[in-house]
Image: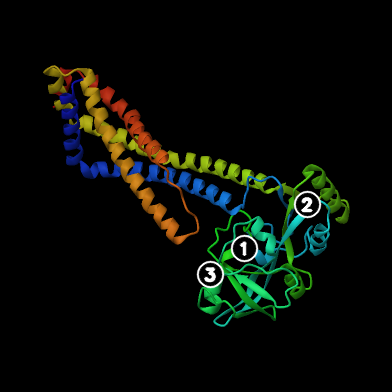
C-alpha cells in the first residue's frame, strides 16, 4: 500500500474521531483505566521488590540467618498485626533466655534480637500511652538497612546511660523537631537520652508488626529491664560463617529442647526470606494484574461497539467507496486504523496517568513504584493490539458489505 494512501487513511481517521470525540471519549476512558491499572500494579510490585532488596543488607549472603516463631500467640485470630499490635501475646516460643543462649552458642556471632514492647512514651511536646519500643543492639544494622540521619545508632552494651534512637516521624511528634539529640524521652517511667534519629524507613519485610518511623529503638537489655523480661522477642538475627548446616541443625535441636521438645521455631537465611517475599509479590502482582486486565477487555469491547456504530452511520460512504473501486483490504485497513488510533490514544493517556499516580504515591507513602521504559513500551504495544483485535470484527463486517446494498440503505 502506497504511503500516500496510508497518510490519507490516517488523516481521515483523525477527522472522524475528532468529529465524534465525545462518543469516543468514553471508549478511550476504558482503555485509560485498564492500562494505567495494569502499569501501576506491576510498577508497585517491582518497587516493593527493590525495597525488599534494599532493606536486606547484603541479602545475597547466605551466612546471615533469622530465627522466628512458627506462630505468634494472638487472642483474636481476625486481628491484623499492623493495626492491632496490642493484641499480640507477650508469650511466645522465643524469649530472653534464647537470646542469652545464642550469644554463647558455638559458631554463632553478631546476635541481634528484635523484641517488641508497647508501653508509655513521653516527650517534651506529646506522649503516647502505648507507643512502640524495639529492643535490639548495635548488630541490627548488619541485617537491616537502618541509616541514621543524626547522631548514632545504639551504643555498645554496658553503657551506664540509657540511650535511645527514634524514628523521624516520632521525633517530630514527641519533640516538635526531627533532630532532638540530647533530649530526654521517658519510656515506661525510665529516662532515655536521644542519641540518634533514623532516616525515613520503608517498613518491609521485617517491620510488619511496627512502623519503624514511629518507633523507639533501645538496647535489648534495657527493654527487658523496663518490662520485667516481658518484651516479646519477635525475631533473632545471627551470623554463621562456618559449617552452616551443622550449626543450624544443632541450634534447631537446642531450641526444640528448651521448648519442651516441640518444634516451635524456624531458622531461615535472609536470602531465603528475600526470595520468598519476592516470589509472593510476583504471584500477587500477576493475580491482581490479571484482574485489572479485565478492564482492558472491557475497553476493547467498547472500541468494537463504537466501530460498529460508526459502520452503521457510514454505510452510504462504504457503498460509494466500494462502487468507485475501493478494495476490501482498503476498507478493512481504514477501520483498523481508526480503532488502533483510539486504543493508542487511550494507551498514551493511561501511561501519563500512571506517571502522575506514581508521583502521588511516592510523595504520600513510603512505597516507590518503578515504571521502566520496557513496561511503557509493552503497555503501548498492548493498547495497539487491543485496538486491532477488537477493531478487526467491525472492519471485516464493513468490508463484506455489497456496494448496492450499502447504497440502498442510505
Give residue 409's quadrant in the image: top left
Q: Look at 54% across and 82% down and name the residue there.
A: 125
Does residue 7 appear to the left or right of 228 in the view shown? left
> Which quadrant is home to the N terminus?
top left
Up the image or down, 312 lies above or below 225; here it is: above
Residue that mark 1 sits on:
210
Q: Residue at x 56, y 45 (%)?
A: 281
The residue sitting at 35% across, 41% down in the picture is: 31
Q: Earlier in the sequence, mark 1 or mark 2?
A: 1
Give the residue number, with chain letter if any, for mark 3. 169
Residue 406: horizontal and vertical position, in percent? 17, 22
The location of residue 174, given as percent across then percent down, is 56, 77
- Within 10 angstroms of label 2, few (less than 14), some, or many (20 or more) residues? some
Q: Is residue 86 above or below residue 358?
A: below
| Residue at left offset 13%, top offset 16% | 325
Image quadrant assignment for residue 231: bottom right
| Label 1–label 2 contact, CB within 8 A | no
Q: Which residue is mark 2?
A: 265
Which numbered disc flags the more N-terminal residue, 1 or 3? Answer: 3
Q: Residue 219 in the image: x percent, y percent?
A: 70, 69
Vertical arrangement, residue 169 with respect to residue 145, above or below: below
Residues at marks 3 and 2, CA–CA distance in whole angstroms: 33 Å
Q: Is residue 245 left or right of residue 161?
A: right
Say how the picture is coloured.
Answer: rainbow
Say which quadrant the C terminus sits in: top left
Q: Which mark is residue 51?
A: none
- Please indicate whether residue 285 sits to the left or right of residue 117 in the image: left
Q: Nearer the viewer, mark 1 or mark 3?
A: 3
- Nearer to me, 270 or 361: 270
Q: Secondary structure at mark 3?
A: helix
Amino acid at each position: 500500500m502506497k504511503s500516500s494512501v496510508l497518510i490519507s487513511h490516517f488523516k481521515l481517521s483523525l477527522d472522524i474521531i475528532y468529529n465524534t470525540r465525545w462518543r469516543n471519549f468514553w471508549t478511550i476512558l476504558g482503555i485509560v483505566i485498564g492500562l494505567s491499572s495494569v502499569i501501576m500494579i506491576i510498577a508497585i510490585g517491582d518497587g516493593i521488590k527493590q525495597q525488599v532488596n534494599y532493606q536486606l543488607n547484603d541479602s545475597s549472603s547466605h551466612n546471615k540467618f533469622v530465627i522466628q516463631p512458627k506462630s505468634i500467640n494472638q487472642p483474636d485470630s481476625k486481628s491484623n498485626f499492623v493495626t492491632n499490635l496490642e493484641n499480640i501475646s507477650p508469650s511466645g516460643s522465643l524469649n530472653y533466655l534464647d537470646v542469652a543462649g545464642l550469644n554463647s552458642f558455638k559458631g554463632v556471632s553478631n546476635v541481634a534480637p528484635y523484641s517488641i514492647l508497647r508501653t508509655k512514651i513521653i516527650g517534651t511536646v506529646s506522649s503516647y500511652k502505648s507507643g512502640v519500643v524495639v529492643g535490639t543492639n548495635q548488630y541490627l544494622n548488619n541485617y537491616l538497612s537502618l541509616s541514621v540521619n543524626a547522631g548514632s545508632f545504639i551504643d555498645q552494651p554496658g553503657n551506664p546511660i540509657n540511650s535511645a534512637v527514634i524514628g523521624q516521624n516520632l521525633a517530630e511528634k514527641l519533640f516538635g523537631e526531627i533532630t532532638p539529640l540530647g533530649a530526654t524521652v521517658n519510656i515506661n517511667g525510665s529516662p532515655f537520652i536521644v542519641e540518634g534519629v533514623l532516616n525515613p524507613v520503608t517498613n518491609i519485610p521485617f517491620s510488619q508488626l511496627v512502623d519503624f518511623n514511629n518507633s523507639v529503638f533501645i538496647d535489648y537489655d534495657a527493654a527487658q529491664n523496663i518490662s520485667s523480661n516481658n518484651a516479646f522477642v519477635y525475631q533473632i538475627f545471627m551470623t554463621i560463617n562456618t559449617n552452616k548446616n551443622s550449626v543450624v541443625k544443632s541450634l534447631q535441636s537446642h531450641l526444640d529442647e528448651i521448648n519442651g521438645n516441640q518444634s516451635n521455631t524456624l531458622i531461615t537465611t535472609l536470602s531465603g526470606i528475600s526470595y520468598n517475599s519476592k516470589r509472593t509479590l510476583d504471584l500477587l502482582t500477576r493475580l491482581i494484574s490479571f484482574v485489572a486486565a479485565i478492564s482492558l477487555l472491557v475497553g476493547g469491547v467498547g472500541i468494537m461497539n463504537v466501530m460498529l456504530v460508526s459502520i452503521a452511520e457510514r454505510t452510504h460512504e462504504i457503498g460509494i467507496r466500494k462502487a468507485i473501486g475501493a478494495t476490501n483490504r482498503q476498507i478493512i485497513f481504514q477501520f483498523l486504523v481508526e480503532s488502533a488510533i483510539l486504543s493508542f490514544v487511550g494507551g498514551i493517556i493511561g501511561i501519563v496517568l500512571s506517571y502522575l499516580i506514581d508521583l502521588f504515591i511516592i510523595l504520600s507513602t513510603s512505597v516507590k513504584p518503578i515504571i521502566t521504559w520496557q513496561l511503557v513500551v509493552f503497555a503501548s504495544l498492548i493498547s495497539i493490539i487491543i485496538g486491532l483485535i477488537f477493531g478487526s470484527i467491525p472492519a471485516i463486517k464493513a468490508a463484506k458489505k455489497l456496494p448496492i446494498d450499502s447504497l440502498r440503505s442510505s
